[in-house]
Amino acid sequence: MAKDEGLAQSTGQQGRAHGLEWTSPAHGPKRPVMGNGLKQPADSYMKQKQWLAVALAIIGGAVSPVPAANWPQWRGPFLNGSSPEANLPVAWSKTNQLAWAAPLPGKSGATPIVWDDTIFLPSPDPDKNLLLFCLDRGTGQVRWQKKVAQGDRVVGKNNLASPSAVTDGQKVICLFGTGDLAAFDFAGGALWSRNLCREYGQFANMWQYGASPLLHAGRLYIQVLQRDPPTYGHARDDRPSRESFLLCVDPATGKDLWRQVRKTDAREESMEAYTTPLPVRVGERTEIVVVGANYVTGHDAEKGDERWRCGGLNRRQNLYWRIITSPVAGPGLVYAVGPKRDPLLAIKVGGSGLVTDTQVAWTVNEFTPDVCTPLLYRERLLVLDGDRQVLTSLNPATGEKQWQGNLGVRETFSASPTGADGKIYCVSEKGTVVVLEAGPEFKILATFSLGEGPVMSSIVAAQGCLFLRTAENLYCASRR
């Protein structure tokens, strides 16, 4: 693992937490800390920002000034990997256009969550504690940290701190692979906590549980798609079987509103998924889309009932093909990708029952991802085959290929691409960043490396900055 000892030594304002040394860099420009400034409910504030950003995305141009945007959950303010942010750097380094670097105690695929002047970040530490950090967005200093669980475990590329946190601007909610689910206010006050594994059984996923929770319209949704029976040693307890389910929780209290069992005819490892649920508007109602165990399903957001089901994922019915890539929604369509570069499906919303033969609008078979979730940005569906380093731009309505190109880096990409400021940001597991133009042709703008792999977390664009998490640091890059 690459290290930059000089970076750690050049920092000041040291503090200690759980025996670890935390520093706030003294080098580089620092942005002024912004206050919360909310004069209306957080939900209303969020919706106004989203509507403005949607309008900008529709017209496909950069309008100035653009209000600073938050990144409240894993795939950003629109749940599609894009942000309305502008004036972002094309390239940066540890000495150029870097606002700050905050040392981290452990690696994780969890994406930074940004709300105004606050950043939330789950992380393990060397003692295998599972922590939630709250950082100052302007300086990178640690405001507070909470030990939520303990007993981190690494299997393959994954650990128990993989799920990203979520926030509504008033509270933050985090979930760890131990089943520990907890909510805190922005001052670090504990609101509620519970352990899903004690209630429903240890998560039975070969590579550890990795789905992020979804916070939508005042409800928290958590999906658990797992193997039954639980044959893995880390999943065994006094329960002989496991149900896969979609859980709806009241974020104010942590109590269940409903739990919908999700059945499948998939077997063994193909029953498992590491995907995150997605809300989709269908007429006057909202559906929660779940991908995994060889199917895409749409569930009533109010009650959890399954409204439709689409097959076509894992067409060869391989017993060991789990699904990692999460769904993305576009106008009238949901995009889902099968495991191991199986086809990408565009499914028309509004169906009922089994819709495999009636609602699939189009499919794409070449250079589809096994891990990276597609990006929907500026009327392009951007699909990254991270194993073969090929990025493809598709027409979201028809699936027609607009352009395709190789990133020019012979490294694996597991982080999902991010779209902002007319650019596409990709980062490899070794910490190499490739920045492309989100335009009518394949065009690489910059390639540079920060090292410090493994990097599994997607780049975040929020509050005029770019945030990149490596195995050692959280970096904040900015032109300001």
Image (spheres, rainbow, N blue to C red):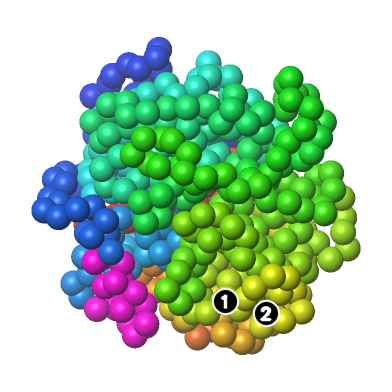
Task: Locate the C terminus and report the quarter of the image it occupies.
Answer: bottom left
Which of pointers 1 and 2 indicates the residue nearer the eye?
1
* In this picture, residue 148 sits left or right of residue 412: left
Against 22, is 307 above or below?
below
Name the residue rendered at 23%, 52% in the picture.
42
Are the two marked residues, 1 and 2, in contact with CB atoms closer than 8 angstroms? yes
Q: Which residues are magenta?
A: 48-63
Task: Name the one closer to the observer, 245 or 209.
Answer: 245
The amino acid on which the numbered mark 2 sits, given as a three-letter code, is Gln
Disc 1 residue crowd, few under 14, some 14–19, many 20+, Cα 10 Å: some
Residue under numbered circle 2:
359
User: x%, y% of residue 459?
Assistant: 45, 53
Give residue 42's mark. none
User: x%, y% of residue 37?
Assistant: 12, 50
Residue 310 seen by the camera: yes
Residue 11 seen by the camera: no
* In this picture, residue 82 sits left or right of residue 477: right
Give residue 350's mark. 1
View extreme (top): residue: 19
Against 161, is 129 above or below?
above
